Amino acid sequence: MVRVDNENSSKPTVHPAPQAPTATVVTRNSFTAAIESAELGLDDAVTPIPPRYWWLKRLAIGVGPILLALLCVRFGWGWVVQRQLDAEIATYIAAGQPVYPKDFDLPAVPEADDAAKLYLEACKELTLSQSEDRLLFDLPKTFLKFSERRDAIRALLEKHAGVLKKLRDARSRNAVDWKRRYRTPMMLTIVSSNTSVSSNVRNFLHLAAFDAQRRGDVRSALDYIRDGVALADAIDQQPSIIDHLRATAIQQRTSIAVERLLPMIRVCNAIEYDPSCVPRGDIMNLRDQIAGEPDLQRPLVYAVRTERAFAFDSMNEISSGNVSLARMYNMTGRPPTASLFPRGFAFIVKPVFIADTLFAVDHLNKTAEAALEPTWPRASRLLARIAPPADFIDQWMHAASDIVEPNLDRAILLHYRTVARRRMAAVGLAIRLYELDHGVRPAALDELVPVYFETLPVDPFGPGDTTFGYLPNAVWPRIYTLGPNGTDDDGELGFHGSHRYGGIHWDHLDPAFFLDGPAPRTKEEFAKPRTLHRNPVDDDR
């Protein structure tokens, strides 16, 4: 249709006929096409932006604050626990306690004064055949069958007389340097270290003392016992708890050797050599050496503080991602092919490891404080206050420290057991001297003061400062400790019912040190009277 506007123009205005709108199709993955359609004014036909893009924005807006909050928690909590850990470590340093690996370095010792050098040389020199190794591997069986194995034992001792000489010379040296230097990571230093005296050397020395006693050579037997005490004290110069347990094992054996030798000891002139008797000064020196006062607690405390430093160093290595928990657990000493978790993850969870480090360090510090106590009842009360992880979440939070932090309760109990053995052996030697001087044993231990002791040794299992029990007139005369239960059972004994060789059970009743020779092995033997004045040389024990 054409319409003419007469007022404004002489020419007709032509209007195009209306056309149907053309729809613009926008694909879901074409954001640019949608924009162009909107610019052409075709809004009615434009497909809207897919909802998923809006959800991504909303998700980002919602998650962003959460991530920010988590970062604040990560750095805030990390800062707090790191400050707490630093303050705890500063307390130990201020007290002069070892914390870092280098703190355990012993001062250099001149070679001429170093006993450790001779001990390690003795280890290398003691090479054994298969039959010789069997003699030392199972000493209780060797002692029980001594008569039939006498020739093999004598041949072994003669073959390695040089080893015994080195052990004797080492006792005369006044310093020890095992050349062990701890460095980060401490766990690998401990695993890879070979500066330890082998069990064969310890058993060899004990066998030599037993053989000398069987031959009636009391003086040589006593000297071998003194060599064993010196060896144990030298091993205790190493800070590891494992080395301390090795030392306690030797001390227990030397106490048993004194018990076996005691009835044979006689005093003689120091000028003339008589193998059947011992100069009085040697007996007094052995008494003091075995008693070990006043430093019996020092090796234990030192060992526990080493464990504290080990946990601190190892946890730092784990939290930094340098060492995996798998490597820590296996203790292989081989370089790891991969960490248990990537360093990025270690960075995220580092506050958890720092808090766990503080937990482990605090636990071991409390354990060291318990180890300072002179008696087991006081130490056990402190150990009971050290709370383990309470629930599953707490256990998960302390999973790493559960690997690096050992439970030392049993090791500490064994330490007090060894202290009791050593002190009873020292009292036994004093009683023997009293008997040689007066013809009879003292009626009470108080009679040993002040000639044979300035003060009586304390029973580490007794309450307060009480000394040991004493039964001089019993069928089996003995000194006894109250034992781990802390109660006086009138000297009654517990025995190993299923143990291969029997023996006194130190976790039951009142373990004892016997004055007439070796201890009974079974309850049935203890029920029978001991043969009076029997010759210990004829006793295959």
Image (cartoon, rainbow, N blue to C red):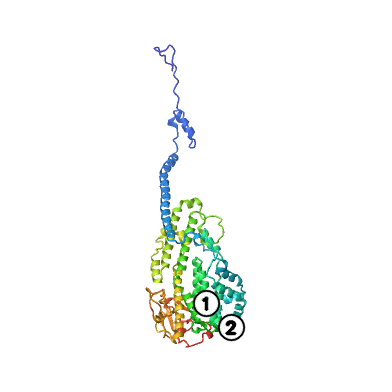
Q: Earlier in the sequence, mark 1 or mark 2?
A: 2
Residue 14 locus on image (x, y percent):
45, 17
Q: Residue at x 44, y 86 (%)?
A: 438
Residue 327 % position (x, y):
53, 59
Image location of residue 229, percent across then percent down: 51, 74
**Residue 213 versus residue 12: which sits nearer the camera?**
213
Quadrant position of the N terminus in the picture: top left
Is the residue marked by circle 2 packed among few (<14), some (14-19), or many (20+) residues within 10 Å? Answer: few
Q: Residue at x 44, y 59 (%)?
A: 93
- The image position of residue 510, as x and y in percent, is 42, 78
Q: What amino acid is at disc 2?
A: Glu
Residue 496 can be seen in this image? no
In this view of the protein, which residue sits in the foreground, 482 or 134? 482
> Could one spot residue 254 in this view of the protein?
yes
Q: Is residue 155 left or right of residue 535?
A: right
Are the residues at dot 1 and dot 2 in contact (C-beta closer than 8 Å)?
no
Determine which of the numbered discs, if any, sits on residue 528 in the image: none
Mark 1 or 2: the one toward you:
1
Work out how far the residue at label 1 is from the one at label 2, CA to CA, in angstroms. 24 Å
**Type of residue at label 1?**
Ile
* Residue sitting at the far front: 271
226 to 77, vertically: above or below? below
Report the residue marked by disc 2: 148
Q: Nearer the viewer, residue 69 or 118?
A: 118
Q: Is residue 447 above or below residue 20?
A: below
Residue topped by disc 1: 225
Secondary element at image label 1: helix
Lateral position of residue 271 relative to residue 494, left or right: right
| Residue in front for this viewpoint, 538 or 34 | 538
